[in-house]
Structures are given as structure tokens and as C-alpha cells.
Image (cartoon, grey):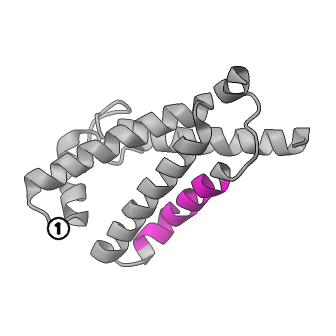
Amino acid sequence: MNIKQDLIQLFLRVALGASYLCAGLDRFGVWGPPGAPNIGWGDWQHFMQYAHKLMFFLPYSVAEIFAALASGLEILFAVMLIAGFWTRWAAIGSGVLLLGFALAMTIALGVAAPLNYSVFTASAGSFLLSTLPAYRWSVDQLRK
């Protein structure tokens, strides 16, 4: 890849990772309390109200397990993408995770919801990132 492509992959990696990290940490109140400006959920309880709406077909306790697993993976994939550690696997994992989220949003809320929040776009960006031949300025590059 050339320097332009290297910069674009770095931008995509960091932009996706930062977005996933921001959303994941919001569920634990890291950015502020519920109702504060620019806060989506602000705590686990508010996030679970939304998650249960998306997983209406599951008992609350089962939905909470899936929500916790998805949140943990989202934060893990975010850190891996930003650092460039096992980037291809983190990109595939985050793409699959977000595609599942987008499909759940579509079933529960209609197709406009995931389109309005660019969930399909972020998933596609993760899948595109997974196809790149190299990840310059990454832990992966240092390991080679």
C-alpha cells in the first residue's frame, strides 16, 4: 500500500474503534449520567431498557447476558482496532457484531433506525477494513 492508503486504513481503524469504544463505554456511565447532553444511555439500566426493546423475543435475563457479551466484545474490538492488534479478526468480529445489531434494530424498530444511526455503514466499514492487505502503524506491523 502507499502512504495515502496507509493513512486511510489508519483513519478507518481509529474512527471505527473510537466509535465502538464511545458507545460501549456510554453503557457504563463513563461519559456522564443518563439525560446529560450527548449521552445515549449513561448507565447499564438505561441501556438494558433499549437492549430489551431490541431483543423483545427473549426473557430479560437472557437479553442481559447477550447485551453484556455484546458490550464486552464491542469494547474489546474497539481497543484492538485502535491499537491494530489482530486487526483483521477485530474487524471481522466488529462487523458481525454490528450487523447483528443492525438486524435486531431493523426487526424491532424498522429499517430507518439502523440507517439513521449508520449501523450498516459501520458494519460495512469493519468488513472492508478486514480485507486490507496490511495495517501500517499497528501492533500487527510491529509483530511482523
Which residue is label 1 attached to? 56
Q: Does the magenta segment cover residue 121?
A: yes
Q: Does the magenta segment cover residue 13?
A: no
Q: Which residues are magenta?
A: 113-128
Helix, strand or loop for disc 1: loop
**With 144 as the anchor, is 32 left or right in this view?**
left
The residue sitting at 28% across, 73% down in the picture is: 108
Image quarter of residue 87: top right
Q: Would you say the magenta stretch is mainly helix, strand or loop? A: helix
Question: Where does the image place residue 47, in percent across and percent down from the top left?
Answer: 25, 48
Question: Where does the image place residue 116, in percent across and percent down from the top left?
Answer: 49, 68
Q: Is residue 37 visible?
A: no
Residue 19 sits above or below residue 101 on the image: above
Who is closer to the viewer here, 1 or 51?
1
Q: Which amino acid type corresponds to the residue marked 1 in the rendered image?
A: Phe
Q: From this viewpoint, which residue is outermost toward the top?
A: 142
Q: From this viewpoint, which residue is outermost toward the right?
A: 2
Q: Is residue 55 visible?
A: yes
Position of the N terminus, as image quadrant, is: top right
Question: Where does the image place residue 12, in percent across and percent down from the top left?
Answer: 67, 46
